[in-house]
Amino acid sequence: MRVRERLSLVEEHILNSMPPLLEVRDLTTRFFTQDGVVYAVNGISFELNEGETLGVVGESGCGKSVSVLSIMKLIPTPPGKVTAGEALFNGRDLLKMNDEEIRSVRGAQIAMIFQDPMTSLNPVLTIGRQITEALETHLGMSSEQAKERAIELLRMVGIPEAANRINDYPHQFSGGMRQRAMIAMALSCTPQILIADEPTTALDVTIQAQIIDLVKRLKEKMGMAVIWITHDLGVVAGLADKVMVMYAGFIVERAPVEDLYSDPRHPYTKGLLGSLPRLDEVEHRRLTSIEGLPPDLLELPDHCPFAPRCPYAYDRCWKENPPLEFVEPGHEIACWVDVRTGRPRYEH
Amino acid sequence: MSTEVKTSPVTQKTDGREDNVLVRVVNLKKYFPIMRGIIFQRQVGAVKAVDGISFDIKRGETLGLVGESGCGKSTTGRTILQLYRPTEGAVYFKGENLVELKGEALRRKRRDMQMIFQDPYASLNPRMTVGSIIAEPLEIHGIATGKAAKERVQELLQLVGLNPYFANRYPHEFSGGQRQRIGVARALASNPSFIVCDEPISALDVSIQAQVVNLLEDLQDQFGLTYLFIAHDLSMVRHISDRVAVMYLGKIVELATRNEVYENPWHPYTQALLSAVPVPDPRVERRRQRILLQGDLPSPANPPKGCHFNTRCPVAFDICYEVDPELREVTPDHWVACHRVA
């Protein structure tokens, strides 16, 4: 066990010698509300390599969106505040940038698409204008150049009759088309990172499949890295290289996509996978539900945040919050228990 | 294929009292008028939300109704319960045509058929305590009042896995999953035999969805309930249903037992829909071939001529643009509405 952990550290070290595109360290975000402090993100660290797709999975309120919004300095302040951590992008800390600097990164080098394309588009501007705006500001294109490029982008994301549709307003587009337009906008400046925050949650499955296919193709073509945030373990399975599972503002498990699904090591991940019905389920089986409710983030637990719902919890789980540790090369969990045996990972 | 081709999954002459059928829907239509004008309103068109559908729901079974948003699945559920009065067609419930009932007679029937709504935040009155929410159907239908009602409420709360002492609390004090349990308790209060579950879990977190689905299954076993389970989550529908009906733009395009629909889908829409659902297994995902549909759902106010699916269908040919295909039985109990299959 110990040797294995040491080995994986070496492996990590070799990987680290090529600097990651984005390196987030100890990111901590709090919201100071009337009801008290909300511990939304609690010191998470992750890396994103060039051309990699990272899936971030968790339920509502687990901090998955807040962590990327923090990196992009899009947390409404007050009440929110990034209280600690750094986010190195091409060697520069995004969190230390002033408004002007971060604005030149946002949209140009790191682009985002959001869940609800209706609220993220400006209803009184044409689709075309919203795309050309970014091209003119970030790339200094003339309005003719920008318009041509906008038509090209809309065509690339599969909007029929792009040259005419460019003069449409968002309400004239369907949900799927709006999301395509959002993607066109996000990709307009060929970003190095695309952050997708539940972009398909509001869409029907057939449209979701179109959007996922589109992002996959564009990623190949443009060689960008993608952070895909979702609550849907199914979506991530076909998309991500690496997945991290979040719970109560902590990363509880991180692994290459195959390992996470075939060999989940955190009780929460295991529970989530067990509670999902499968499309290929022939025999009816009872779903294993995770009892209880996700924690209220108004206090930072001094024990494992999942302990109250965990079937394996023992006394140590109620005393110490487990750190994220390697259990296998590339596979990390924050848990005191080995779910394969149900016994503690460390015997005293 | 059977030699005698039936053209509807129900034999239209009977009221369904035979064959253990609890709910029989015959050629149900619900059109919503599109009006123009301010004082003198005139009808300029109609949204054909449900456009002539027929099916049976047997006693004790769960019929899953799936489709994308705007396909008319929720309208179907509401029209069956007469929350919307249908434009045309009949709904036989225990042999009685609900469409012909009104007033007190219909109200008395409602006791036996209930509904669980999608949004647990909007479907509970925030000014009422949980106890009075659940007791309301008891009082309306004269089942129990006073102390008896109180006891029944506590019993119901316990049944759905909530603490009986919660009766004095208000809905805002509960999480989404707990609220949905309150909605289930309210639906069960009048001892119904039939419950329409309209997307009961889609507003809930993944780990909570399984809790509510398990609860629904347990209650079905315990009370022999019959469900119409409306959802867009195809994996969950497969999990909970005995038979599945797939809807597209106001029509049923395929109807069969759950494994038939999922293992041997005949309709190109069902095939595309199933291939679009992501499976939480990277090894399966890598091998899968997706059938990507082009474009979006057409407006139900102006559906295409012929087969409604012809604008997105990868295998449409001449006749599909002219004639609307009928639902036919292609193998025993497997019904498909497609010219390619006939």
Image: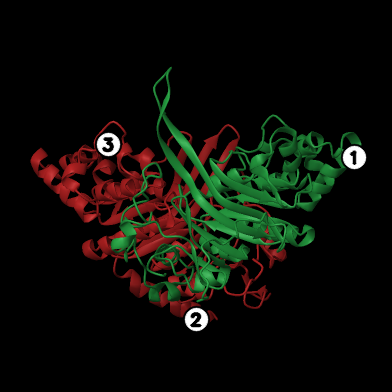
Chain colours: A red, B green
Q: Quadrant of residue B222?
A: bottom right
Chain for disc number 2? A
Q: Which numbered mark, 3 or 2, is in the foreground of this view?
A: 3
Query: x%, y% of residue B30?
Result: 52, 42
Is the same chain shared between marks 1 and 2?
Answer: no
User: How many marks on residues?
Assistant: 3
Helix, strand, or loop for circle 3?
loop
- State how far apart marks 1 and 3 are (Cα): 58 Å
For the residue pair A212 and B219, the one nearer the viewer reads as B219
How many neighbours does mark 3 have within 10 angstroms: few (below 14), some (14-19), or many (20 or more)? some
Q: Which residue is mark 1?
A: B148
Disc nearer the start of the sequence (3/2): 2
Classify residue B9 as left or right of residue A255: right
Q: Which residue is mark 2?
A: A4
Helix, strand, or loop for circle 1?
helix
Q: Which residue is mark 3?
A: A169
